[in-house]
Amino acid sequence: MSLEQFKNRNVGVQHYRMLDLSHTPQTGWGQFKQVVRRTLSLELFVGLKVTLREMTKALFFGKMHTTKYPFEKLPVGPRYRAIHEMKRLLESGHYRCIGCGLCEKICPADAIRIETAYGEDQRKQVQEYTINFGRCIFCGYCAEVCPELAIVHGGRYETASEQRASFSLFDDMLTPIDRLKEQKEFPGYGSVSPDADKRIHKTPLAY
Amino acid sequence: MMEVTYLGVIIKAILILAIISAVAGFGTYIERKILAFMQRRLGPMHVGPYGLLQIAADGIKLFTKEDFIPQNANKLIFMIAPIITAATAFIALSAVPVFPDFTIFGIFVPSVASDINIGILFVLGMMAAGLYGPLLAGMSQANKWGLIGAARTAAQFVSYEVVTGLSLLAPIMMVGSLSLIDFNHYNETHAWMVFTQPLAFVLFLIAGFAETNRTPFDLLEHEAEVVAGYATEYSGMRWGMFFIGEYANMITIAVLASIVFLGGYTDLGFIPGWLAIILKIAFMFFLMLWVRASWPHVRPDQFMWLAWKVLMPLAVINVVITGIVIMV
């Protein structure tokens, strides 16, 4: 590898298309000719034409760029990693979390805290589950490591609040029980890929 | 013709003041909307229907803002400088006829507050005197950006004022009068001046843009270079007065261009005169916004090069040719 490649700090492929610019006139006569040429060819009106074209496009052909943000929102990509959501089981309505604590363990920012205990049915129950969003770096490891698809990253990106705690408690993140029917099986970050069935192979047991 | 009464003049003065201030305020809304549309944005939308009440919101903001005077500023001059800009802009409008003469309640009303026989000279002189506003404001505020703005005001002023005068000299020679009423009467019998004096029209437009600090020549307050130029230290209503003055000047230039070059308030086919001149003024106003959305502004040295080495010789040649044609 030559030094030239190290010195070239431009990222990407360098296929620049050079504009066909005429040379800067050196003499006074050349400058004069350039001024006359530019004046008489009415170059300035090209600029006026462009803005008028954009205005007619915006006003009459629905090409306005503006999104009226609080009222209109652009769709967020399904793999966007915003505030977490806790999912429920669709059949029973019970929360999916099995209290394994993997998310707490993998969290590189030490933002997740989980406390579990055995309930009366001898299942592990989540006593307390909080995410400190002052520390969370939204890396997505918790959603990736969760074996039950219980914690996922949702699309709720408007995280301004008067209290940090407004987002971070288990019950806030959990799907409300009355809106269980609206809970979508999660296509985004941390979920299994759509072609997961094809990629699963039988465990070779017959040695 | 009825005598011009004191009461009539006072009523007209109040009307000019009220209407032009309102139109100047509305002009800021129009400007923001047009600029937004040309960049495919919506512009002000939230205050009132289509953002129409944005002017009221801006007015409340300007009136309630702290009136700030810097410590080392020359307080008296700092305080009167915006008044100079606003006042001269309105005084200039007193000699400008906007509508044809009309009769209301049986009283004949001439359309101009004071039909003085040096109308166009008075208007140009007043607009030129208005430049003392930015000049004194920039020099009095003990701020380097303001000082640069003031220096640019002076440089721009001496450059374009020559062009304004010389470009209007040829039409004045053809009409043979300085009264704007006579200019309008000239249009009734002759072709529009824009066809007989196209070069003078272009020169006057360029000089008019410079006179009102509109974008290709907004050297005095160009944000990217001199923060806000002469208006750096101003806030609240004092700052607002500069802008009322600027928009009033835009209207004056639009009216002047309409009357001198675009046929004034003579009837235009089936369009009555008063509507025709409103359309012309609106178009000239739109042109100023259109140009602002389209073109970058020039450097001060480029502007002075343009004014002294290109526009002034062209204006002089235009005057000489007009003179020869009139004599022959």
Image (spheres, coloured by chain):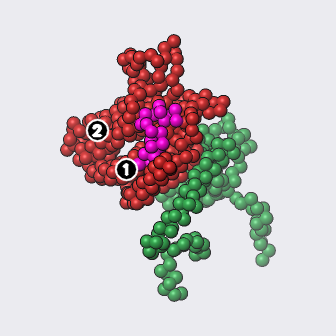
Chain colours: A green, B red
Residue sitting at 25 percent across and 47 percent down? Answer: B139
Q: Position of residue B49 (x, y in %)?
A: 57, 30
Q: Secondary structure at mark 1?
A: helix
Residue at mark 1: chain: B
Residue sitting at 35 percent across and 42 percent down? Answer: B128
Q: Position of residue A100 (x, y in %)?
A: 59, 55
Q: Which residues are magenta?
A: B166-186
As drawn, B62 above or below B203 = above
Q: Position of residue A90 (x, y in %)?
A: 72, 44
As drawn, B238 above or below B219 = above
Asked whether B128 or B151 is in front, the reply is B128
Q: Quadrant of residue B269?
A: top right
Residue A162 visible somewhere in the drawing:
no
Residue A10 visible somewhere in the drawing:
yes
Give the mark toward the camera: 1 or 2.
1
Measure the C-alpha gap from mark 1 to mark 2: 24 Å
> Residue tagged by mark 2?
B81
| The disc label shown at residue B162, or none | 1
| The disc label shown at residue A182, or none | none
